[in-house]
Amino acid sequence: MTTVSERISQSAFDGSRLRVVLLLDLYDGAQKQFLEAYEHMRNHVASVPGHISDQLCQSIENPSQWLITSEWESAPPFLAWVNSEAHVETVQPLHHCVRDTRSLRFSVLRETGQAFSAAPQALLKGGLQASPRVGDGVVRHALTFTVRPGSEKTVAKILAGYTSPAARVDDHTRLRRTSLFMQGNRIVRAIEVQGDLMAALRHVARQPEVRAVEEAINPYLEQDRDLDDSNSARLFFTRAALPAVHHVSADGPADDEVNRHALFYRAKPDCGLAVARLLSRQDEAAAENPAGPIVSSTVFHRDDIVVRLIDVSGPLDDHPSLALGVQGRRKAAVLARLLADGESLARGTEAALARHLTGADMQLITDRTAPPES
């Protein structure tokens, strides 16, 4: 049987079908309005590339509880759709009917009535995940947004000076780490959660120290938002979401100093997915070398924005090609063709890679790890 390396705990690029489950709790009396909005949305989703089917279900116990399940050829077309502005506009009418939602995404591993095949063609269109992934119980997510040019220093000072919220969310969920980076006027906030991501995000949003920071940076955001307006806040955080599409951990030396970096890859229009896929494949190969400097790598992708969060043993610039996520001139040339600012990479020299690495390395604003539970 074909197996996937246990070092890869998350991947959107294994070619397997995707099952999406959306749990909804409707406002009292909103069922008819919701059904009309769903019919409008369903007609749009049916024409999205990669979409196979969907089902709408209503609870037989509580008529306010609904379930939407959809099936996709693989994760990338779904992520492209759910992170698009067209999706934001399509689902907007649903928000007036829904009190609460929760979205869950699963790769299809086995299926009743279908014999499993580990052959390569099984991982093409409509395939099954080859083998279960072994995770570490950590969910990784990021947000990205821009601030008004000229406000960068002010915003960085606000973000660096906040008081960390309590790490414990409940008996099963805990905040593990928050890392904030800036490049130009773009902010990237990466978080690691042990347990339930949505429970952790709601917990953080309710903390007064976090709310104070969010209110303080509001005047400097390029996209206006009103945190007292649930629809405005939802739209902002929907557009800011930067999903993790791949995570791999290596068996590198644990006793060396490990530094965290975020590298920003400015993809050409419609090339973001290809950049994310290339970096993920390169990190998979690099993880097979236990003496390599990359301890772990998480690739985040949305539209033409790709961010690669790496934990590196030793200085970042000791191994420019590995740090950038490309090994060899051929891979550097491929990445160069996909990036809006990749001309110098085409040379493939260590000097060219080092210069691009310096430009891609985002400024660290703050990196906070929760203390272990006593």
Image: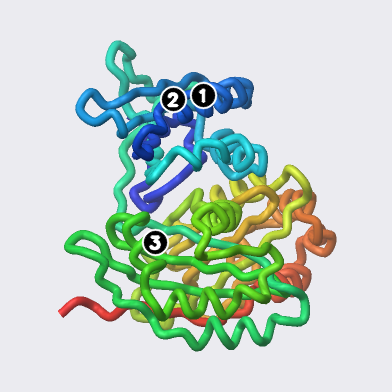
- Inter-mark Cα distance, 1 to 3: 30 Å
Where disc 2 sits, the SS reads helix
Q: Which residue is mark 2?
A: 32
Question: Of circles 2 and 3, which is in front?
Answer: 2
Is the residue under label 1 in contact with that under label 2 (CB below 8 Å)?
yes
Where disc 3 sits, the SS reads helix
| Residue at x 62% of width, y 70% of height | 187
Q: Amino acid at mark 1?
A: Glu
- Inter-mark Cα distance, 2 to 1: 6 Å
The outermost residue toward the right is 343
Residue 105 position within the rendered picture, expressed as x and y whole percent measured from the top left:
40, 39
Q: Quadrant of residue 349?
A: bottom right
Residue 40 position within the rendered picture, expressed as x and y whole percent measured from the top left:
58, 24
Residue 36 is tagged as: 1
Decide: few, some or many residues near mark 2? Use Cα within 10 Å; few <14, some 14-19, many ≥20.
Answer: few
Height in image: 364 above or below 64? Answer: below
The outermost residue toward the front is 29
Q: Which residue is mark 3?
A: 201
| Residue at x 56% of width, y 27% of height | 41
Residue 102 position within the rendered picture, expressed as x and y whole percent measured from the top left:
37, 44
| Residue at x 36% of width, y 55% of height | 198
